[in-house]
Structure formats: structure tokens, C-alpha cells
């Protein structure tokens, strides 16, 4: 027969083994969750940094298009975050003036920053920053002076994404100018319609990726129309927007300037 002391010794050994196993399990679980938390924070920080760089890219794109010209580059440091480029993201953009087609872009481009698998977010308009009616602001196609032509927003689509969307048309009334026609001075209202035509060039790379924005030329077309006001209608992916712009009612007519800045985006110099 096994004595009481022998049974007590075996019981202590078994208890020690069980407690050791529980302790090792708890340590393993703690290490797993702490590692996951650290990785989630790292992915979130990298996504936030890339998101800010995308907002800066939108500003640089407008400057290159109608400001400083030439080229600019923005460097993205990517590890868990990815960056993707699309040539046909939002469908066909058409712009009509008084019912006549003045502008068409069949390949509206975009840049998309994709967060890591542990990053989460909700829909939010990042550029311009508005609190009320963010969806309406995002879908706006026709804008005036001082409003951004390139918007940036974030959303969740299987992963957290931040999207650069350059699909806005800016309409300005420039004033009244005199033109000499057949020896007679005539006064015309001048309107300008501006658009950034973004195309995606050669892309690739990993780690530290330079996104290069290059102005490859501005085209300007001039249209003379009767009347002292214009009606501009823009359509994009089933959404239609119309705005009316009035000039000096005493003018002899109107001139519409359609200016398209062609900007190529690439990751290779």
C-alpha cells in the first residue's frame, strides 16, 4: 500500500506541474496579445502617416497643375501599408456648357493608400475638412475659387483605405474684357473652366516609394457664345450637377476658356 506521505508528495508534484502549465499559458497569451497590440499600433501609425502624405500629395497636385508647374515628389515609407494607382477609378466625366459638350475625361485616375490588416477606420472626408454633409461635399463636381479641386477621403472596404480623388471642375468668372472685332471694340464676359487630367505612368517599388507628379502641359480652348451668362453641367458616374454663372448683363457676349492641366503620376524618374 502507498502511504500517506507518498500520496502527498505525488499530489504536490502534480499541482506544481498544473500551476506551471497554467502560468506558461498565461504568459504565452499575454505575449501574444501584447505583440498583437504593438503590431496594431505600428500599422495604425504607419497608415496615419501615409494618410497625411496623401493629403500633402493632393495639395502638391494642384500646385503642379495650375501653380508652380514643373514636378514635385512625395515619398511614402511603406511596410504594412500599401499604395495603389488606378487609371479608371470613377467613370467618365463630362462637362457641358449651355448643353454643348466642352470637356470629357474617360479615365479619371486615383491614388489609394491601403492600411494593414489590423487597421480600422470609418468614412471621413480628409480634404477639405468639413463636419456637416461630408458625403455631399465628396460628391461635389463643380467648385468655385478657393475650393480644392482634389479631395481625399478615407473609408473601410475590407481594409482601411484613403483615396485621392481629382474629379472636380473649377469655374471662375474672370470679368469683362474688350476685343477688337472688324474695327469695333466689343465687350465680353470671360469665364474659365479648369480641370486636372491625371494619368498614371509607370509605377512600382516597395519600401520607400517616391510618388512623382509631373506637369506635362496645359491645353486651353476658347469658345464664344451668345448671352451674358452660362449654365455648366457636369456628370460623373451617374451623378449630375448644374450651376449657373452670370456675367455683366451689358456685355456683347461671353467667352469660355477651357483649361486642362495634364499631370502624370509615376514612381519612376
Image: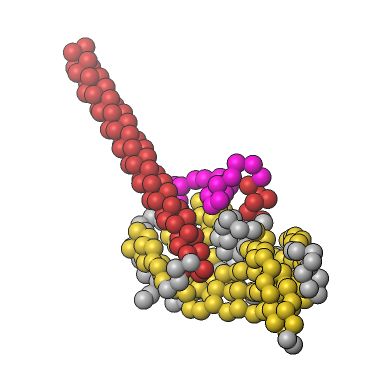
- For the C terminus, the quadrant is bottom left
Q: Closest to the observer: 197 or 237?
A: 197
Q: Residue furthest top?
A: 4
Left/right of residue 203 with respect to residue 94 in the rendered view: left
Total number of numbered discs in the rendering: 0
Residue 32 appears in the picture as rendered: no
| Residue range (magenta) | 114-133
Q: For the point 25% across and 28% down, which residue is it? A: 20
Left/right of residue 170 with respect to residue 83 in the rendered view: right
Q: For the point 73% across and 86% down, which residue is it? A: 183
Examine the structure image and report whether residue 118 is included in the region drawn in magenta: yes
Q: Residue furthest bottom?
A: 182
Examine the structure image and report whether residue 66 is included in the region drawn in magenta: no
Q: For the point 79% across and 66% down, which residue is it? A: 250
Residue 190 in percent (x, y) is at: 68, 70
Q: Closest to the observer: 144 or 30?
A: 144
Residue 141 in percent (x, y) is at: 67, 60
Q: Closest to the observer: 192 or 6?
A: 192
Q: Closest to the observer: 85 or 189?
A: 189
Q: Main secondary structure of the magenta part?
A: loop
Left/right of residue 33 with respect to residue 187 in the rendered view: left
Residue 86: quadrant of the picture:
bottom right
Q: For the point 49% across and 45% down, which residue is it? A: 120
Q: How has the structure been colored for display?
A: secondary structure
Residue 49 in percent (x, y) is at: 39, 51
Residue 67 appears in the picture as rendered: yes
- For the N terminus, the quadrant is top left
From this view, report whether residue 5 is shown above or below residue 209.
above
Residue 252: quadrant of the picture:
bottom right
Residue 209 in percent (x, y) is at: 36, 65
Amino acid at each position: 500500500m502507498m502511504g500517506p506521505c507518498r500520496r502527498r508528495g505525488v499530489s504536490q508534484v502534480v499541482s506544481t506541474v498544473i500551476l506551471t502549465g497554467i502560468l506558461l499559458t498565461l504568459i504565452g497569451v499575454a505575449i501574444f496579445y501584447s505583440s498583437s497590440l504593438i503590431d496594431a499600433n505600428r500599422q495604425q501609425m504607419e497608415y496615419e502617416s501615409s494618410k497625411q502624405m496623401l493629403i500633402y500629395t493632393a495639395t502638391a497636385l494642384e500646385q503642379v497643375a495650375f501653380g508652380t508647374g514643373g514636378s514635385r515628389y512625395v515619398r511614402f515609407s511603406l511596410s504594412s501599408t500599401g499604395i495603389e494607382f488606378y487609371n479608371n477609378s470613377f467613370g467618365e466625366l463630362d462637362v457641358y456648357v449651355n448643353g454643348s459638350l466642352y470637356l470629357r475625361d474617360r479615365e479619371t485616375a486615383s491614388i489609394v493608400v491601403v492600411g494593414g490588416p489590423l487597421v480600422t477606420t470609418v468614412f471621413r472626408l480628409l480634404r477639405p475638412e468639413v463636419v456637416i454633409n461630408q458625403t455631399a461635399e465628396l460628391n461635389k463636381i463643380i467648385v468655385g475659387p478657393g475650393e480644392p479641386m482634389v479631395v481625399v477621403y478615407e473609408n473601410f472596404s475590407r481594409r482601411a483605405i484613403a483615396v485621392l480623388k481629382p474629379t472636380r471642375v473649377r469655374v471662375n468668372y474672370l470679368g469683362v474684357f474688350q476685343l477688337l472685332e472688324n474695327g469695333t471694340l466689343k465687350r465680353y464676359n470671360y469665364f474659365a473652366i479648369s480641370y486636372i487630367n491625371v494619368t498614371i505612368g509607370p509605377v512600382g517599388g516597395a519600401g520607400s516609394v517616391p510618388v512623382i507628379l509631373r506637369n506635362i502641359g496645359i491645353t486651353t480652348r476658347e469658345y464664344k457664345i451668345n448671352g451674358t451668362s452660362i449654365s455648366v453641367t457636369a456628370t460623373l458616374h451617374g451623378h449630375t450637377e448644374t450651376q449657373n454663372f452670370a456675367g455683366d448683363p451689358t456685355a456683347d457676349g461671353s467667352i469660355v476658356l477651357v483649361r486642362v492641366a495634364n499631370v502624370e503620376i509615376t514612381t519612376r524618374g
